[in-house]
Image (cartoon, grey):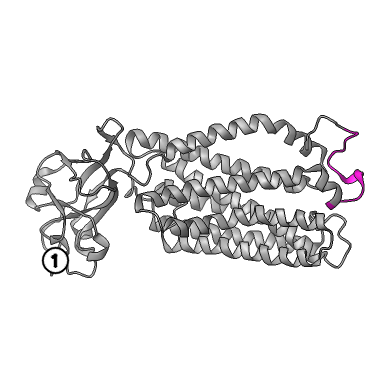
Amino acid sequence: MIIMFQLTVTLCIFCLHFSPLTNAKTIQGVFSSDAARKSKGQYITKFLFHGRNSLMAYRLEDVTTAVKKEAKLLMFRDLENLNSLNCSRRLSRAHLSITLSAEEHNQTIPHTAASPRAWHVVYADRYTCQEGDITEDLKELRFQIMLFNPNAEGDPLDHFSAEEAGLHSFYLLFLVASVAAACIYSRLLWRVLHKGGPMHSALKVLSTALLLQAGSTLFSYVHLARYARDGVGVPLMGSLAEFCNMVSQVQMVYMLLSLCMGWTLSSRKPQSKPLQWDTSPTSTALAVGGMLIQMCLQGALLVWEQFEDTDHHSYHAHGSLAGFLLVALRVMLALLLASVLYGVLRAERSPLRRDFYLSFAKGCILWFLCHPVLVLLSAAFSEHHRQKVTTIGVILCQSISVVVLYRLFLCRSLHWEVCSPSAITLPFTVSRDRRVPY
């Protein structure tokens, strides 16, 4: 298990950190005539411009070769609809053509609509649509491209595309709120964990998942804060944010599988402590096996997704096939949990226990279903709002889910009725410590 965990870490970080930065808003690389011929134009990046002072600036090293090859940058607004056309017709549909004839050039992007529009940047030259073999030496051109939106003062200095604007401010506010909540409630949580009790294991796993989510938010903020200055950011931080998010999902799945398998396998026995890990070898093997399978699936899908989409800081968007499969995996987990809890609720006669299980189900299903539901809902919004709706919604919904589960696990009165009729098994009692609130 430890070896698999380390392998997943290595694969994720390697794939994310060393993948090409073709979606960063400061792009460094090479213009290749061979790549342009294979794809009817070398695709460079996409950017959602807004405002009247949007800007694209490029720097080129070998201007002489660029002039000889008749190199140019083409900008399209609806590139996806042109894939069926032949090479020359496809390139002729460009809305803007920029000849690469200078070492540096600033190009203002025309403002054509009230809402932000996505522009695709493509490289082409005289050989792009030429058929047959080419005997000339097609030397590559090193370049740097910077894309800017106007800031609050109207100056073209903002590296963020329209769908990313405001996310780093949200991450900052969320971190401040998280630190404030931690300062208020960490002492109480530490007391409960220190005393043990029926919810001890569940609280530890839940706390670990919460810390990982907080780490993911912190890494995302550091990446975006640097990105705001140079348009590149710290890709490793974006990779770590995605990895922490993945491991937090694994932690939640482990807790749910352990609890649900314990309920299922102990349903023939009196359930004096229903929310306890069943320590039988069968239930332990099922829980650990399910966790490992889920971890391998999610890790493989995340690695696959990064080969298709290298925009590290939009990991909640999941617009590729691998991202769709990740969403489907969360839906299946939620359905599995719902089916198990439905069976438990039907067999339970105690109203208090039924209420406890129902609240537990709501908190857990919210954690797993918020992402698929928000992805579907975001389709009703404009393109520049979809990523923000999904990212902010997922973080807030999963935070609400954690709060619901914490309140449920720490609720002393429900523990008395649900976990055991004996005060000895409770995490704390009134006679032991009157300072601990409900």
> Which residues are drawn in magenta?
418-432
Is residue 60 at all visible to an observer of this figure? no
Position of residue 363 in the picture relative to residue 23 (left or right): right
Q: Secondary structure at mark 1?
A: helix
* 188 lies above or below 379: above
Residue at point 17% right, 45% down? Answer: 110
Which residue appears farthest toward the left when viewing the image?
68
The magenta stretch spans residue 421: yes
Q: Is residue 43 left or right of residue 176?
A: left
- The C terminus: image quadrant: top right
Tell me which secondary structure the magenta stretch mostly adopts.
Answer: loop
Q: Position of residue 109 (x, y in %)?
A: 19, 44
User: Which residue carries the number 1 mark?
Assistant: 89
**Which residue is nearer to you in this view: 353 or 6?**
353
Q: Quadrant of residue 55?
A: top left
Q: Amino acid at mark 1?
A: Arg
Residue nearest the viewer, comparing 158 with 135: 158
In the rendered image of this protein, does residue 281 appear above or below residue 113? below
Residue 417 in the magenta stretch? The answer is no
User: Picture coordinates of residue 49 (x, y %)?
Assistant: 27, 45
- Say if residue 320 shows up in the picture: yes
